[in-house]
Image: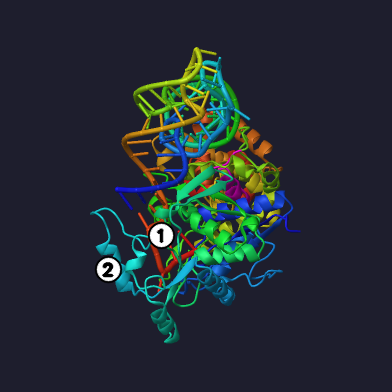
Amino acid sequence: MTNKVRVRFAPSPTGGLHLGGVRTALFNYLFARAHGGDFVLRVEDTDQSRFVEGAEQYIMRCLEWCGLSPDESPEIGGPFAPYRQSERKDRYKEYALQLVADGHAYYAFDTPEDLERMRRDFKKDEHSVAQYDHNTRMHMRNSLSLPEAEVAQLLADGARYVIRIKMPANETIHLTDMIRGEVSFDSNLTDDKVLLKADGMPTYHLAVVVDDYQMQISHAFRGEEWLPSAPVHILLWQYLGWADKMPKWAHLPLILKPDGNGKLSKRDGERLGFPVFAMNWTDPKTGETAKGFKEMGFLPQAFVNLLAVLGWNDGTGKELFALNELVEKFSIERVHKGGAKFDFEKAKWYNHQYIQHTDNAALAELAKPYIKLNLDALGNNTELPELSYVAHVAGLIKDRCTLLPDFWAQGHFFFATPTTVDEAAVKEKWNEQKRLFFTAWLAELETIPVWDQVALEASFNEQLPNHGLKKGDVMLPLRIMLVGGKYGPGVFIIAEMIGREETIKRIKNMVG
RNA sequence: GGCGUGUUGGUCAAUCGGUUAAGACGCCUCCCUUUCACGGAGGAAUGACGGGUUCGAUUCCCGUACAUGCUACCA
């Protein structure tokens, strides 16, 4: 079963789950499903200083909301447990030591000050940066530069050390990327990355290789920011003797800021007024909450769809894909090489599309919390009507709703008497003649036998000639009375739905 | 600075050497609608630049420019 497709999403629990993270998870998920493989969630928590309480749970809830639940994870376990790197700590050191024994890595005893001095002393000009590599390592304190006896003594004394990879000289390291094709690197230009930190934890570089090997990962998808360190990982796979088991790589393009340039960040969302996290994230330290797509009123299906087509398309021009269609159509080879700027307007369009394609009963369920919230805020203890009524309303207003909160903004008058009325909209054309018309119609409404939109409109029309008015003269005033503003579905259906008592009340409010 | 990667309208993008260079979002105009939307019909708007290769380049190659990522005992 060594050929089985196994992929992993390996986030670091340092905060909210970013758009790009969800997209990486999505591509992993789609690939796994399409190939009958396993999708594993591995938590990369090797940096204890960046650990954030609750982040891991939060990431799992986000994946759940998106419908991208893993087959194996810290929470549900699996045959390759544990899935938290901090809990696999002991496994990494033996490989690091093996690399040292084989001459592919070495102990380094440098202090942070030593490193700082090296970077300063060896930089060639104002703009260059010196790194720990074949040029500088013999000037540092490590098991390559120090006498053997001194190294042994240092180790025996329990000196703090890290283990660094010894990058070979004059080698070209080749990588075949599923998205980018052949990519190559000069071994002289990449530094001797730390593999095992002084606290005994592995760095990403060691951990990702050991874990991908042990978890039998067949395909590794990650962000483009990892490409420069790929040669280190490839060398590790070779040095550890696992070259034939190395996963196929794919480096995903970045998601960029909508304006200007650069990688999309949490700050951009705040600045431009849209979320960058899947769900609300509250930083446990600062207490600050960053908005999530979920809470802003996105449907998870829409969110997943828009992420899928950010950097990928099926070549036909089709834009709307349900998750199962994505599983069927998605191919990693069609993923773009270049980064894409995130367009929130387009994101909203997707949500609008999904709202249109969701049936009214389901929409009613989705809109309910938002309606309830606003009703409660009004404080006049108005009960939320039964679901069938909400569903009816949803059907009437869904085409003007882009985000879930719009169901209140566009339909509040179905649930409560408008609190603000745009009187200015009718004021200058208002006159006694119109007032008399409404007073007369009001009398009709008291006794009209059938209360439905057809009967109401007929009665309204009949009244017109008696007052020398045209329908257009009084339609807008009626709308303002019932709705409060110049928007919403047909006025007579609104009257039908809110009922006789409420309709009469709202007209009286304005006619007196 | 070095290295890697990338570059089709404002944005997302199709094109696997030959097209009037699709489509979508957004924008504009008109129609529909006695409101607002939805919907419909139109419109403006694109191959960074310079060299090659070729009968023919958006497409292949090289260079330049620009962008972006990395250059941590972070991932």
Circle 1 sits on which residue?
A: A191
Q: Main secondary structure of the magenta part?
A: helix
Question: Picture coordinates of residue A341 (x, y %)?
Answer: 45, 43
Q: Secondary structure at mark 1?
A: loop
Q: How many marks?
A: 2
Letter of the chain that mark 1 sits on in the rendering: A
Residue in the foreground of this view, choosing between A409 and A256: A256
Circle 2 sits on which residue?
A: A117
Q: Secondary structure at mark 2?
A: helix
Question: Outermost residue, bottom direction?
Answer: A157
Q: Check if residue A305 falls in the magenta segment.
A: yes
Q: For residue A306, what is the image quadrant?
A: top right
Question: Picture coordinates of residue A206 (x, y %)?
Answer: 53, 66
- Does label 2 lie on the same chain as label 1? yes
Colouring chosen for the image of the structure: rainbow
Q: Which residues are magenta?
A: A301-313
Question: Picture coordinates of residue A18 (x, y %)?
Answer: 50, 57
Amino acid bearing label 1: Asp
Q: Residue at x 57, y 77 (%)?
A: A90
Question: Outermost residue, right direction?
Answer: A1
